[in-house]
Amino acid sequence: MGQMAASAHQKPKSAKANQTRKWNGGPLDADPLSLPQRVSIPAVKWHYRAIGIIRFATIYADAVKATDSSPIFGHFCWEEPVTAYRGVAMRTATTIARPRPVVLVDLVHKHDPERNVTLHACFEGADVTARWRGWSRALGLPLLMENGEGELEEAETRLGALKVQAPQPHSGANPLSARRPITFGQTGQPRFWTQRLMTGTRPPAY
């Protein structure tokens, strides 16, 4: 009874945390500095793979245009504005053919996960952070990361389109500036001009 009561009070784990994201294909790299960019994304779900669906997407600065093509059912074209996307997420996954870790950079739709677009996939992770941040800047979308439960959260605090950071202390003036004499007056001529002409030396303030 004690064990049953203890198990009843245990917090259930999130279903998202138990899911393992899959990737079907090799490395993928789209350059955010040269828009528009075209990517070919193989289907991940088994029933999509069975009918040979491949997504051909073109990413513009303000829109995403894609074609889901299948040799059996033909092709289906769709288009979404960039504002329909929540942000650019960095995620981890494993390959389907041979279990191998892979890092993905995804363009995450606000309402329809079927219209997410993978922008970068790599097995070593050398350039993933640069691509992640580069796509965020190019599209003006926030950076997203997964928490321990598999849910996406913004990696940076924002106020609208502006990034909010901790206030930085003012450096203040140079401490030596108070020791420097004012060498020019309002007339534009150096102070102590008469003394310099008579003695040919600098005044003591110098």
Image (tube, rainbow, N blue to C red):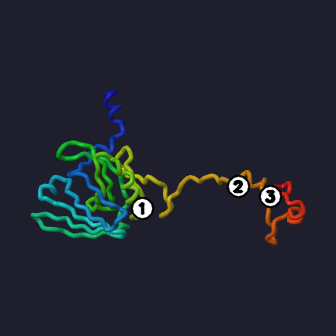
Q: Mark 2 vs mark 1: give the one in front.
A: 2
User: Reading the chain from its start, which is encountered first: label 1 or label 3?
Assistant: 1
The residue under label 3 is which amino acid type?
Answer: Pro
Whether residue 19 is visible here, answered yes or no, is: no
Of the numbered discs 3 and 2, the one sitting upstream in the chain is: 2
What is the number of the mark on residue 181? 3
Which label number is shown at residue 166? none
Q: Nearer the viewer, residue 184 or 93?
A: 184
Amino acid under label 2?
Answer: Ala
Q: Residue at x 43, y 54 (%)?
A: 154
In the current view of this chain or complex, which residue is farthest to the top? 2
Q: Quadrant of the C terminus?
A: bottom right
- Check if mark 2's residue and mark 1's residue have beta carbons within 8 Å: no
Of 182 and 153, the residue lying toward us: 182
* Vertical arrangement, residue 96 with respect to residue 33, above or below: above
Q: Quadrant of residue 116?
A: bottom left
Residue ranking furthest to the bottom? 187
Badge 2 is on which residue? 173
The crowding category of the residue bearing disc 3, from other C-alpha atoms within 10 Å (few below 14, some 14 to 19, many at least 20), is few
**Closer to us: 116 or 184:** 184
For the residues bearing labels 1 and 3, Cβ distance under 8 angstroms: no
Which one is in front in this view, the residue at disc 3 or the one at disc 2? 3
Q: State the SS at label 3.
A: loop
Q: CA distance from mark 3 to mark 2?
A: 15 Å
Residue 10 x %, y %: 35, 36
Q: Cβ–Cβ below 8 Å for labels 3 and 2?
A: no
> SS of the residue at dot 2?
loop
Q: CA distance from mark 2 to mark 1?
A: 34 Å
Q: Which mark is residue 137?
A: 1
